[in-house]
Image (cartoon, rainbow, N blue to C red):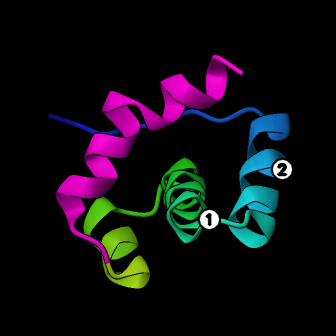
Amino acid sequence: MKCVVELSEAEEMTLQQLSINHMHRDTRTRAAALSLRGHRIKRKLTAGQLGVSGQSVCDWLTHGATAAWTAR
């Protein structure tokens, strides 16, 4: 299964701000992962840079992080 994300310019800016300024570390990590994947950085490299599993990165893309943010 491929984990791919396409981000608009506004979404990219929002994720960058979340990855820097959000008060919860988990949200900052997820935002950074989505931003890196939006730049076509491979899943394993993204996971290694952020200290999480590759499966976590894929799960965030497919199961909830994007759905939760787009619902707001």
Give the CA separation, mark 1 to mark 2: 18 Å
Q: Which mark, by number, is residue 13?
A: 2
Drawn side of residue 31 relative to residue 43, left or right: right
Q: Which residues are magenta?
A: 52-72
Q: Nearer the viewer, residue 2 or 19?
A: 19
The structure residue drawn at horizontal position 75% and vertical position 38%, both measured from the top left corner, is 11
Number of residues whose C-alpha sits closer than 10 Å to that of mark 2, classed few (under 14), some (14–19) or many (20 or more): few
**Magenta-colored stretch includes residue 70:** yes
- Name the magenta segment's main secondary structure: helix
Give the image location of residue 8, x and y in percent: 75, 32
Residue that sits furthest to the left in the current view: 1
The structure residue drawn at horizontal position 35% and vertical position 62%, both measured from the top left corner, is 42
The structure residue drawn at horizontal position 23% and vertical position 37%, both measured from the top left corner, is 2
Q: Which mark, by number, is residue 24?
A: 1
Residue type for callout 2: Met
Q: Nearer the viewer, residue 32 or 40?
A: 32
Rendered view: 32 above or below 55? below
**Magenta-colored stretch includes residue 66:** yes
Give the image location of residue 33, x and y in percent: 49, 60
Q: Nearer the viewer, residue 43 or 62?
A: 62
Q: Are marks 1 and 2 in contact (CB under 8 Å)?
A: no
Give the image location of residue 63, x and y in percent: 32, 30
In this view, the mark in front (1 or 2): 1
